[in-house]
Amino acid sequence: MTMAVNMNMNMDMKMSMIRNIRMIGSGEKTLVLSHGYGGSQAIWEKVIPFLSERYQLLLFDWDFSGSGSGLVLHPSNYSFAAFADDLVSLVDEMGLKATIFVGHSMAGMIGCIASIKRPDLFRHLVLIGASPRYLNTEDYEGGFEREEVDNLFSYIQSDFHAWGKSFVALAVGVNDPNSVEILGKSFHNMRPEVALMVARSIFLSDNRDILDKVEVSCTIIQVANDFAVPLSVGHYMQSKMKANASLEIIESDGHLPQLTAHHMLLAILDKVLII
């Protein structure tokens, strides 16, 4: 029998960035599904029916998704370290151990940091379209030049909704109106000032130095043609991880395989979740 528990609570102040906690499905293993920038737990809707048949799923929304308090917090609240602290507190509060963390985009690095803080809470990390750094350097290809990122910030400030519409189309990457609608709804629910703070936190971050501290085994999943994360990033992460890390490539376009290539993603997860 499938268990479904809705937890309409915001927990306490230390959990101020996590909203709409749900526990669904059944099974001995627990998967923690964490969305990235501009998303919500709705981005998992195509894989949930398959995963919930065999696993217990913990889902939630980050506050910036528009489902939160509506407060504009200090930029420090949107740091990767702050998100990781909230994730650790959530898993602890739920009484879970040795979970499998599935993090998309920025959430991948949040999971890495959380696993360093509390490796007992995670048995495996699945990092989908994750990146430790988005800016290029002389010896690292992150995908973006500083001028491009500064222009992105200016566009968010000047016309957030127009920027969001174009960004969603790039993120989806394929002709898939349903996926554009799913992502677009949560994207445009973000408050522009919050969207800018989180974007700055993401695109100006450099988390490369944490990779060799990750002791929990990882599966890195990348889409072959992802505008935000070039394949070089996946290979870089795999080479720098302290833990055993495998790299899986999905031959498709876009940044959200859980929406646009979910059958290929599920095939990879079938292999990974045997652990």
Image (cartoon, rainbow, N blue to C red):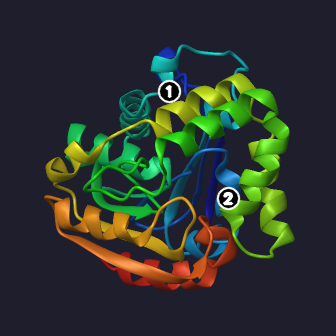
Residue 2, by quadrant, is: bottom right
Residue wearing tag 1: 78
- The residue closer to the viewer here, 196 or 275, is 196
- Determine the secondary structure under disc 1: helix
Res. 26 mark = none
Q: Is residue 67 visible?
A: no
Marks 2 and 1, how far apart at CA? 21 Å
Tell me what residue is drawn at x 56 percent, y 48 percent. Answer: 36
**Residue 90 position within the rendered picture, expressed as x and y whole percent measured from the top left:** 44, 35
Residue type, numbered disc 2: Ile
Q: Is residue 157 visible?
A: yes
- The residue closer to the viewer here, 156 or 85, is 156
Instruction: Please identify the quadrant where the N terminus is shown.
Output: bottom right
The earlier-in-sequence mark between 2 and 1 is: 2
Residue wearing tag 2: 43
* Label 2 packing within 10 angstroms: few (<14), some (14-19), many (20+): many
Instruction: Please identify the quadrant where the C terminus is shown.
Output: bottom left
Residue 98 in the image: above or below residue 198 = below
- Determine the secondary structure under disc 2: helix
